[in-house]
Amino acid sequence: MSQENVALLRAAYDGWNAGKGFDPELLTPDVEFIQPEIGDTEYHGREGVARGIGELTGVFDDVCAEPEDFFVAGPHVVVFVRLKGVARGSGIGLELPLAHLFRFRGKQVDLWHTYPDRNEALKAVGLEE
Amino acid sequence: MSHENVEIVRAAFKAFEEDDMEAVLRFCDENIEITQAPELLGASPTQHGHAGVLEAFAIWPDLWDDYRVEIVRLIDVGEYVMAWTINRGRGKDSGVPVEMPFAFVFSVRAGKIVQWRLFMREEQALKAVGLEE
């Protein structure tokens, strides 16, 4: 099951990076989305996720999230992500190593939490690098 | 002397907060060297001199509205002063708030900042001064 979750996430990142957005079908209707450094920082539901991603792309153009490593801990998957973007209107790019923590309920994600500090994400699920 | 250096850096941040660029420059040596965070792409990785200070502010802080720097910690580490900060601003078009942590490593000589390095992660700054967590 856990490797199946990793495969679902890989496909979701592929879709996102291909400009199709993050597949809403992978998210439960009551999904909670937390991105501490951007916008409102906490969002609820699929529309909330779309709004949160919209706020990210509101300040950065050409956003791309490249998954580098996947760590499975029970229903959780921590993904080390390299988030790339260009600050809107500036030509100044930013390339940030972050972590995304996903919690699965069945085959859907009910929690997606971005961590600027990758180790904090691992600690949150009882793993340490 | 280390405490004095910390206070010079603190005063430079305060001058920036007050939008007093002339005061910021008074705290910077004429030959100051600034090194940008490696995660910042598309900008010159280093700037030099007082013109370089202004150029550095144009690279990142000027991209945002209501840009503010909050000092979380400011400590002396031998010949360096380290500052952990939270930088906040709003997208110029979108108004979306953005919050970025930046760590600064300063070298101060004879009352002036001679080197100023930026990092987006604390561990990078610690490594730069020979400290590892």
Image: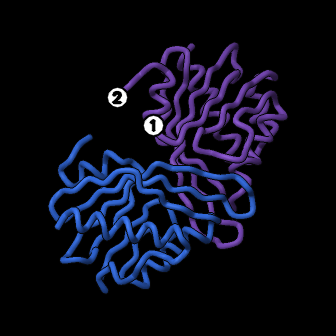
Is residue A6 shown above or below A96?
A: below
Asked which quadrant contains residue B36, the reply is top right
Name the residue located 28 percent from the left edge and 63 percent from the top edge.
Answer: A6
Residue shown at the point (24%, 48%) measured from the top left: A123
- Disc 2: host chain: B
Secondary element at tag 1: helix
On screen, residue B11 versus residue B72, left or right, reads right
Q: Who is closer to the viewer here, B93 or B65?
A: B93
Chain shown purple: that is: B
Quarter the N terminus of chain B occupies = top right
Question: Residue at label 1?
Answer: B122
Position of A25 compared to B102: left or right? left
Q: Quadrant of the C terminus of chain B?
A: top left
Instruction: Tell me which label, 1 or 2, sits earlier in the chain.
Output: 1
Chain at tag 1: B
**According to the colouring, which chain is blue?**
A
Residues at badges 1 and 2 in contact (C-beta under 8 Å)? yes
Question: At x 71% / y 57%, what residue is drawn?
Answer: B63
Q: Alpha-carbon distance for marks 1 and 2?
A: 9 Å
